[in-house]
Each structure stands twice: as structure tokens, then as C-alpha cells.
Image (cartoon, rainbow, N blue to C red):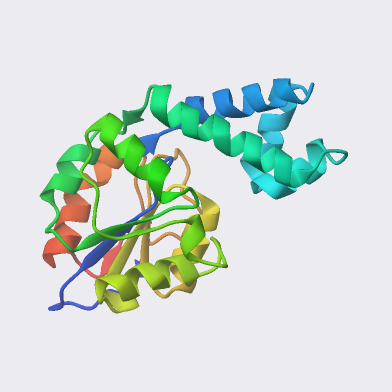
Amino acid sequence: MTTEPGRPGRTKYVLFDVDGTLIDAVSNQRRVWGIWAERYGLDADEVYQVALRTRPMETFAQVASGQDPRECLTTLHELEDEDVRSGVYAAFDGASELLHGLPPGSWALVTSNYEHRVRGRFLRTGLPAPGVIVDAAAVEEGKPSPVPYLQAAARLGAEPGDCLVVEDAPSGVRSGLRAGMTVWGVNAAIAVEGVHRHFVSLREAVPHILAFASGSHGNAAA
């Protein structure tokens, strides 16, 4: 049992990661990196395995050290934008019910992607977009720094202790914990280290997230 920092009797806020948490973009990411690898004559599987663990500029340094990293990034961004326009996206089960069930102004998205792509994916999947999206361009320090989640809370007018972070990845979990927020993990068979609660799927977490937002959750995590 881990004690959560949430405080009862106050307005609650929910901050979501996007890819892997609300939207299943694994096949899209693999496809984009596969096409990128082909452009540079590289093995698609090897490149994708590196890309899973590192940020794009770090990936380029490892797999294409002889190439101009800015050119590599431009190519990747073009492929990602095209994928948003033409790719097939799917929201995780429960995502639509969850986001429609939260009070307006009580939730935000915190993503390492870019806002225009996130909004495009939300349009493609029919998910409602919030007023606050903190993307890669909004912060100088990305996850696992606490900065992205702290900025989202500030833009919502929320105190960190009144925020629930919903994440699927270790870097995002660390970001939320460092921000002093309650952090729940979803869409993973094994709990990410540090989470206050763990759910195998987003669908399983939906009623608990809605209860947190309504202020009716308990302070102890299972």
C-alpha cells in the first residue's frame, strides 16, 4: 500500500499522457520509423528498437551518426505528419467514455509529441480535445523532468497535490512523481515502478479515475 498525496475536499484534476495511454499508436510509430529507416538504408527493426528507448536526436546519433541530425528530424516530422493525415488510429477501450465523463476544465494532456499531431489524432479517433495541451514545444525539459506536468497544473490553476497523472511509461511516471502528483499506471501487464495504483488496461481504470475526479476516491492505493 502506498499513500497518495491527493487532498480530500478539493477540486481534482486529471493529467493524461497520450500515446500508449489514451491512443494506441504503436503500429503507427513502427510504420513511421520503418519508412524513415528505409530512406537511410537502415534496418527497420534495429532502428525501431533504439527509437523505443531514446529521443529522436539520440536515436539518430546511434543509428545514423554520419547523417545531418536536423535533416533526419525533418524527414521524421514529415513522415509523422503524413501518418496523422492518412494513418489508422485507435483509442483505447474506455478512453471516450472517460474523457466525456470528466468535467470541462478538469483535465489536460501532457505529451512528448506535438500539439497539432495530438489534435489530429483526437479528431481521427473522435476523442474530445481539452483546452490545455502541454506538448514538446511548450517546455525546454521533457519527461522525466517534472516540468511538463507542473506546467499543465499551472495552466489549469491546480495545485500538484490535487492532480492525478495517468501514464503508461516509466519516464512519464517519474515526471508525475517528481511533480508531487498522484500517479496511476495503465496498459501494462506489470506495474511501472513508483505508481500509486496499477491497472492492466485503461478500461479497468475508468471508474476509478472518474471517482478521483469527483473527489470520492480513497487516499490509499492498492
Left or right: residue 3 versus residue 113 is left
Q: Residue at x 48, y 48 (%)?
A: 113
Q: Residue 160 in the image: state x and y as whole percent.
A: 34, 76
Residue in view at x 15 percent, y 58 percent: 211
Q: Residue at x 71, y 38 (%)?
A: 72
Residues 82 and 221: in front is 82
Quarter of the picture holding the C terminus: bottom left
Image quadrant of residue 143? bottom right
Q: Nearer the viewer, residue 161 or 146?
A: 146
Q: Is residue 4 visible?
A: no
Question: Does residue 108 sit above or below 81 in this rendering?
Answer: below
Q: Position of residue 83 (x, y in %)?
A: 47, 27
Q: Is residue 20 above or below residue 79?
A: below
- The count of marks equals 0
Quarter residue 189 falls in: top left
**Residue 177 visible, this orientation:** yes
Q: Position of residue 88 (x, y in %)?
A: 38, 22
Q: Give the image location of residue 181, x and y in percent.
A: 37, 71
Q: Is residue 68 above or below residue 33?
A: below
Quarter that holds the N terminus: bottom left
The residue closer to the viewer here, 209 or 44, is 44
Give the left or right position of residue 188, taking residue 130 as reference.
Answer: right
- Seen at 48% across and 34% down, the residue is 81
Judge left or right: residue 92 versus residue 72.
left
